[in-house]
């Protein structure tokens, strides 16, 4: 099994890369998160954003798996499937996707709870996507939730009703104004019926048997290293394990079976939502990069915060994931800048540090930047690494040396064909 992961704060371009390399695989399996992801892919000149569906969905013959570590929101999922069908009616979604029986269900009250916690001053505002991700994983950990496989249990409706009522009444007691209960419940059960068009499987058995039979699996990570629940910039993180270890636990596959670990990073940084961001650019250049790079949340539409490439954070992400190959995206967005910066270390309390996980607030930390000469050539149509501008080659060589792994792919634009294989 090979793995594709985000190394920053999400939105690195994982979807595009997976869509591209998935041709070499038999199975593409998502292992974490849910509809909080936004994996944008261009097909036939049109762009679509996948949320819970794996990015191998466009290729006939690939089995896409919604893995055990994921949380599935039937209402959102139904909408996503219908959107995909209208995007391209030739995709047999019900055939191309199977769902782990052990994946947890996102109930509508969890989304209401997410919104309430984001908006109520008694809670930490994380800047979530308001998809109910946190409350779902919390209820999973509390052992209070229902899973995909429970859908066929005779008491499924009663169990769900009980949870909906409990959480709904709790929110009412906090003085929240909520949508009508009956409508919410009805919409959920309608979506559950829709979900039943899909095959629910014992995904651990399926995946391990497939590996034994010589099939190739690509594990697709959502979110990214710095949003990991344990090793990210807590509390401004997501609620799942976004790392290579999460691919093993989320899919039930032994670490011994892992081959390549592709880490995807932009040539600069973005972050959507709150939290520490040492290299953030506050002047108009940040705004310029945002509009050039179309840096607006594909899921929520929020403008993304922009920063320079953060090398200490990247080294940390490479280390905790065991990344073997780097995929660099969006260097094309920096084309034309006279100089580009890379953060080489931080200064916190007058001390030099390279440990991002030890930093607790933005005010304590100053990023120390190394400035490099920018590249003026438009690289978006280049197909050969030998045609790349010398300044960009210097930038890539510097990264390879610092990170001690090769930059194997350089993405030169959002299009499927806009990628250069470097080695
Ligand atoms: P992809 O897979 C960027 C961020 C949210 C918020 C924090 C917690 O497209 O890279 P959550 O809804 O998960 O409880 O929000 O995590 N976040 C993402 N940011 N890309 C994503 O996914 C994200 N998924 C969650 O903005 O700061
Ligand atoms: Mg995204």
Image (cartoon, grey):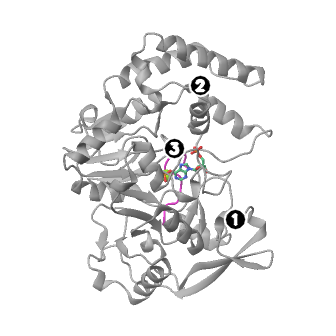
The one nearer the camera, 33 or 86, is 33
Q: Determine whether, in the image, residue 385 is placed left or right of residue 355.
A: left
Q: Residues within 10 Å of mark 3 (few under 14, many from 20)?
A: many
Looking at the rendered structure, the secondary structure element under dot 1 is: helix
Quadrant position of the C terminus in the picture: bottom left
Pointer 1 residue: 358
- Vertical position of residue 136 compared to residue 312: above or below: above
- Vertical position of residue 91 compared to residue 245: above or below: above
- The residue depicted at 34 percent of the width and 48 percent of the height is 55
Looking at the rendered structure, the secondary structure element under dot 3 is: loop
CB contact under 8 Å: marks 1 and 3? no
Looking at the rendered structure, the secondary structure element under dot 2 is: loop
Pointer 3 residue: 36
Question: Ligand 1 closer than 8 Å to the CB at disc 3?
Answer: yes
Residue 162 location, x and y as percent? 59, 14
Provide the major secondary structure of the magenta segment. loop
Residue 47 location, x and y as percent? 36, 51
Which region of the structure is painted magenta? 293-301
Residue 317 location, x and y as percent? 53, 65
- The residue depicted at 49 percent of the width and 43 percent of the height is 33
Q: In which quarter of the image is residue 89?
A: top left
Q: Can residue 375 be seen in this view?
A: no
Q: Quadrant of residue 322?
A: bottom left
Numbered mark located on residue 144 in the image? 2
- Vertical position of residue 244 compared to residue 350: above or below: above
């Amino acid at each position: 099994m090979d793995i594709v992961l985000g190394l920053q704060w999400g939105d690195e371009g994982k979807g595009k890369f997976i869509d591209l390399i998935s041709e070499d695989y038999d199975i593409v399996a998502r292992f974490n998160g849910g509809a909080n992801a936004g994996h944008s892919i261009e097909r036939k000149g049109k762009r679509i954003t996948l949320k819970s569906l794996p990015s191998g969905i466009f290729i006939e013959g690939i089995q896409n798996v919604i893995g055990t570590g994921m949380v599935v929101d039937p209402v959102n999922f139904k909408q996503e499937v219908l959107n995909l069908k209208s995007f391209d009616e030739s995709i047999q979604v019900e055939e191309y996707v199977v769902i782990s029986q052990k994946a947890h269900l996102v109930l509508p009250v969890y989304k209401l709870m997410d919104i309430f916690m984001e908006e109520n001053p008694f809670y930490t505002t994380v800047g979530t996507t308001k998809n109910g991700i946190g409350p779902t994983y919390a209820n999973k950990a509390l052992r209070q939730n229902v899973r995909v496989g429970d859908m066929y249990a005779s008491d499924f409706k009663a169990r769900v009703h009980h949870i909906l009522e409990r959480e709904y009444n709790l929110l009412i007691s906090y003085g929240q104004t909520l949508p009508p209960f009956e409508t919410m419940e009805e919409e959920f059960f309608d979506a559950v019926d829709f979900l039943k068009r899909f095959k629910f499987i014992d995904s651990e058995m399926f995946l391990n048997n497939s590996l034994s039979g010589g099939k190739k699996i690509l594990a697709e990570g959502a979110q990214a290293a710095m949003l990991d629940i344990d090793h990210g910039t807590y509390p401004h993180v997501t609620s799942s394990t976004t790392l290579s270890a999460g691919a093993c636990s989320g899919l039930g596959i032994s670490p011994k079976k892992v081959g390549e670990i592709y880490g995807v990073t932009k040539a600069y940084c973005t972050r959507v939502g709150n939290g520490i961001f040492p290299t953030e650019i506050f002047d108009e250049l940040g705004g310029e990069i945002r509009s050039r790079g179309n840096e607006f949340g594909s899921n929520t539409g929020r403008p993304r915060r922009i920063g320079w490439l953060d090398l200490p954070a990247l080294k940390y992400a490479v280390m905790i994931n065991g990344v073997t190959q780097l995929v660099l995206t969006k260097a094309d967005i920096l084309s034309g800048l006279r100089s580009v910066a890379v953060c080489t270390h931080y200064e916190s309390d007058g001390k030099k540090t390279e440990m991002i996980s030890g930093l607790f607030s933005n005010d304590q930390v100053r990023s120390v930047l190394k400035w490099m000469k920018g590249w003026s050539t438009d690289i978006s149509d280049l197909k050969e690494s030998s045609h790349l501008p010398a300044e960009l080659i210097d930038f890539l060589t510097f990264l390879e040396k610092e990170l001690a792994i090769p930059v194997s792919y350089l993405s030169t634009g959002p299009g499927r064909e806009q990628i250069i294989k470097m080695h």
